[in-house]
Image: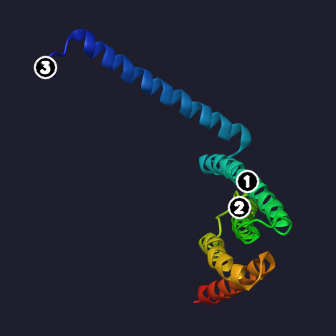
Amino acid sequence: MVWGDTAARRRRRELRARRARLEAARRSRRHAERRRTEGLTYQEIERRRRARWRRIYGSAAALLGVFVVLTGALQLATAHESADDAEFTAAVALAELAAGLYGIAAGITVVRRARRELPGSFSLWFLAAWTAMIVAIPAYGYGDLIGGPVAVTALWLAAVAVIVWFLRRESRD
């Protein structure tokens, strides 16, 4: 008996415990009925629930990636027209393109593989996208010295090609 424990407190605690047991029994009966009517195991029900959430998150990532890619493409298109700091605009647009393409690819993969195991290559994809965004900074610096937004884009593409080649070579180990 706890100090200050009255009969009313004990009674309320017992009622809460009884309600919790009854709710657990109801939940168990509902799950059993669903498994019986649909012919599903509890694991399959949980797998379907997890797949539904993966589809929601994957769709959101793909839509956000599309938005970022469109924003980057519009910035890249206007970078060649504007004379004020066109190289910086091109570098920011290229970084946005890298992030958006990663979002699209990861989102589509999650949606397609929602019921199965997700690939382990997500970390390599993220590393490639992250370094492509970071490489936009030196591409901006050197492209500004060489000759404009076209040079920024060319240097960035060359650096991204080297990064992807290196990551693919290292992932074979």
Disc 3 marks which amino acid? Answer: Trp
Report if the CB atoms under discs 2 and 1 are less than 8 Å apart: yes
For the question of whether residue 167 can be seen, the reply is yes
Q: Is residue 7 above or below residue 25?
A: above
Residue matched to label 2: 103
Q: Residues within 10 Å of mark 2 (few under 14, many from 20)?
A: many
**Horizontal and vertical percent for residue 91?**
71, 70
Checking the image for residue 3, the label placed there is 3
Give 76 or 19, whichever is nearer the viewer. Answer: 76
Answer with the quarter of the image where residue 39 lies.
top right
Q: In the rendered image, which quarter contains the N terminus?
A: top left
Q: CA distance from mark 1 to mark 3?
A: 57 Å
Disc 1 marks which amino acid? Answer: Leu
Q: Secondary structure at mark 3?
A: loop
Report if the CB atoms under discs 2 and 3 are less than 8 Å apart: no
Q: Between disc 2 and disc 3, whose residue precedes?
A: 3
Residue under the image location 70 percent in, 55 percent down? 61
Q: Is residue 87 above or below residue 27?
A: below
Q: Residues within 10 Å of mark 1 (few under 14, many from 20)?
A: some
Q: Between disc 1 and disc 3, whose residue precedes?
A: 3
In this picture, residue 132 sits left or right of residue 10? right
Residue under the image location 63 percent in, 79 percent down? 138
Disc 2 marks which amino acid? Answer: Gly
**Horizontal and vertical percent for residue 127?**
60, 74
Q: Secondary structure at mark 2?
A: helix
